[in-house]
Image: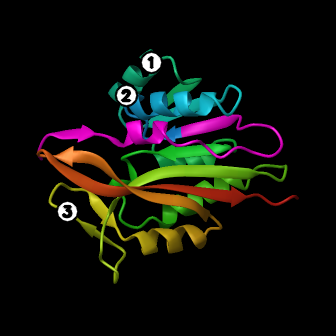
Amino acid sequence: RGKTNGEAPSKKKKKKAPSKKKGELKRGIDLGCGTGLSGSALVTALAATTRKVAWRGVDLSPRMCELATKRGLYADVRSVELLDALRDDPPYDFFVSCDVLVYFGDLDPFFAAAACNAAKHAAKLTAYLAMTLEDGDDADHGWDLTATGRFRHAPQYVLDAAKNHRWRNVTNSQSVLRRQSGKPVLGRIYVFAFDTQTR
């Protein structure tokens, strides 16, 4: 694998997070937080639009969790599989996954688990999901595996998979997500919204 240099976090700093009409985003989860680099950019971006968000970081690597904890950005950091965290944790208001879902082919289980978590809210509100994916053009399967071991996803497949689980697209913009062996890798920054139902 060639040398990589992530660029998506700096792009995120320029985007304003959607705000609720009543109240603010109160609980957020950084799915696959790594060392907390993306979390740092998000905390900065959200600071101007919301009150303090209680962020939780989750990552499969215990070492990455240790490094993320040292940044002091998260209320807590756990080493756990992200789908398990979504299924088992209390509901979140904001979900973020930067440079992580590129290791998933089929995105249906992810959108389903995120929707299941957001639907746990007792009150009617809107939860938001921000994520990055590398652009693919396999219209038949929706994704393809590259030589780097990462998956690329066709934008229409992503939108359809999200819609199947009640995630509506707020925006998706093409961007250079990182560099592979000095060459730019194009992808998209997606933002989805999930409207919970009153019980």
Q: Quadrant of residue 2?
A: top left
Which x, y percent locates residue 92?
66, 43
Question: Residue at image x 46%, y 31%?
Answer: 41
Q: Is residue 6 one of those drawn in magenta? A: yes
Which x, y percent locates residue 59?
42, 37
Q: Which mark is residue 4?
A: none
Label 3 packing within 10 angstroms: few (<14), some (14-19), many (20+):
few
Whether pointer 1 and pointer 2 mark residues with C-beta atoms closer than 8 Å, the reply is yes
Task: State which tag comes first along the sequence, 3 or 1.
Answer: 1
196 lies above or below 98? below
Q: Is residue 102 one of those drawn in magenta? A: no
Residue type for callout 1:
Arg
Q: Which residue is mark 3?
A: 146
Q: Which residue is mark 2?
A: 35
Question: Residue at image x 45%, y 44%?
Answer: 81
Task: State which tag comes first along the sequence, 2 or 3.
Answer: 2
Whether pointer 3 and pointer 1 mark residues with C-beta atoms closer than 8 Å, the reply is no
Q: Secondary structure at mark 2?
A: loop
> Which range is magenta?
1-29
Residue type for callout 3:
Thr
34 lies above or below 130? above
Does residue 42 appear left or right of residue 178 in this picture? right
Can you say which quadrant of the picture contains the C terminus? bottom right
| Residue 185, visible in the rendered structure | yes
Label 2 packing within 10 angstroms: few (<14), some (14-19), many (20+):
many
Q: Quadrant of residue 47?
A: top right
Q: Residue furthest bottom?
A: 140
Q: What count of labels does the image hold?
A: 3
Question: Residue at image x 41%, y 52%?
Answer: 132
Does residue 172 appear left or right of residue 9 in this picture? right
Question: Residue at image x 37%, y 28%?
Answer: 35
Q: Which residue is mark 1?
A: 71
